[in-house]
Amino acid sequence: MDINRERLIQTFLTLVQIDSESGEEQEIIAYLKKEMDDLGFKTDIDKIGNLICSNDPNPKLMLAAHTDTVKPGKGIKPIIEGNIIKTDGTTILGADNKSGVSAILEILTSIKENGLKVELEVVFTVKEEIGPIGSSNLDFTKLKAKQSINLDSKPGDIVSNEPSLMHFDIEITGKAAHSGTRPENGINAIQIAAKAISKLKLGRIDFETTSNVGLINGGMARNIIPEKVTLEAEVRSRNDKKFEFYTKKLIETFKETALKYGGTIDIQANLRGKAYKHQETDPMVKLLVECGRQNGIKYNFTSTGGLTDANIFNRHGIKCITTGASGNDYHTTREYLEIDKFVIGTKIILDAIIELTK
């Protein structure tokens, strides 16, 4: 079954011109709801803004794509130059992940045009780029499919391995005092934070583990010993033992340092993702590889330190494989989409869907 190349391109051009930076997806979700209604799907927008769609009470497969973009993603003006779609360089393009959303719409339209009955569930998520918050807040009792394709990668790539991710919200409390007249009466919360941070391994720890302190805020004025400081930190690893070790190490380091210098500390740890790995022998993986081969694409298996919605779906018992039809130079104003690969990537996923839902 073929797809309509020009319609796919036009759908993409339309979608990238709908502003949808993370947290501002209402317009594109409303647009997609109408499209899915017209395709015969039952649709529902949940409390956080995700769009959940189904055309059968017992869907055999779920398709997923996130609708938000990173900044600067407002006022996107796509430019076509030969086989490339890009922007004028003042904004991102939004192929991450409007290419995935466009591919799903084209796939569903092609299926309908050919009169096929394919039992599907579709989830368009929000706030993926800052979380993934949308998928983390889904009501999973509403989802019925037990296997899924997440369209959020390049054509020819299968994300086989994602990390566990722990977010830390840390508050250190010291004691305020005048920095010029009675500094000895104060306990400097920023100093405690600095001492703790200096003891941590940050950045790339090894090939599957990273750690970062990404935000620090505290103090009232330059002449006041800072009483409070807040930090946001994270640990990621694709290895469960390393993940446990470095998350515990971070917590212990901050607690011990605060105690040593007379401060108190509150640490909130929030598990945002759980490591998973898909084997090349997995039936869904093998099918995608074969569909790629039939369309002239050799798949690469990639491990990532990032998190996609697939991490959340897998954690909740839905086997989800991330592949896609996306572009290049994500999250930059140099982002671009290769049209031929976009079309082929969409066709591969369509072929896989037909096989998976027989």
Image (cartoon, rainbow, N blue to C red):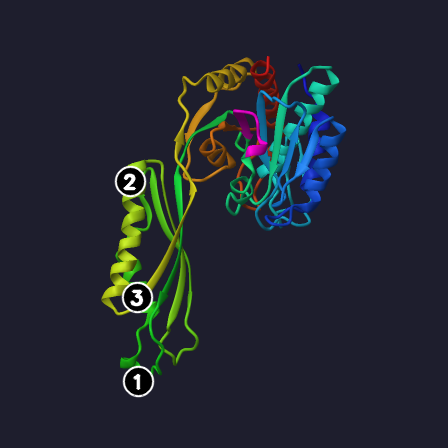
Q: Label 3 is placed on what type of residue? A: Ile
Question: Is residue 353 shown to the viewer in this render?
Answer: yes
Q: Label 2 is placed on what type of residue? A: Lys
Residue at image mark 1: 182
Q: CA distance from mark 3 to mark 1?
A: 18 Å
- Image side of residue 129 versus residue 102, left or right: left
Look at the image and give the residue range highlighted in magenta.
Answer: 141-150
Pointer 1 local density, CA inside 10 Å: few below 14, some 14–19, many at least 20: few
Pointer 2 local density, CA inside 10 Å: few below 14, some 14–19, many at least 20: some
Identify the mark nearer the N-term, 2 or 1: 1
Residue at image mark 2: 242
- Image side of residue 337 versus residue 239, left or right: right
Contact (Cβ within 8 Å) of mark 2 with mark 1 = no
Residue at image mark 3: 192
Q: Element type at marker 3?
A: helix
Q: CA distance from mark 2 to mark 1?
A: 44 Å
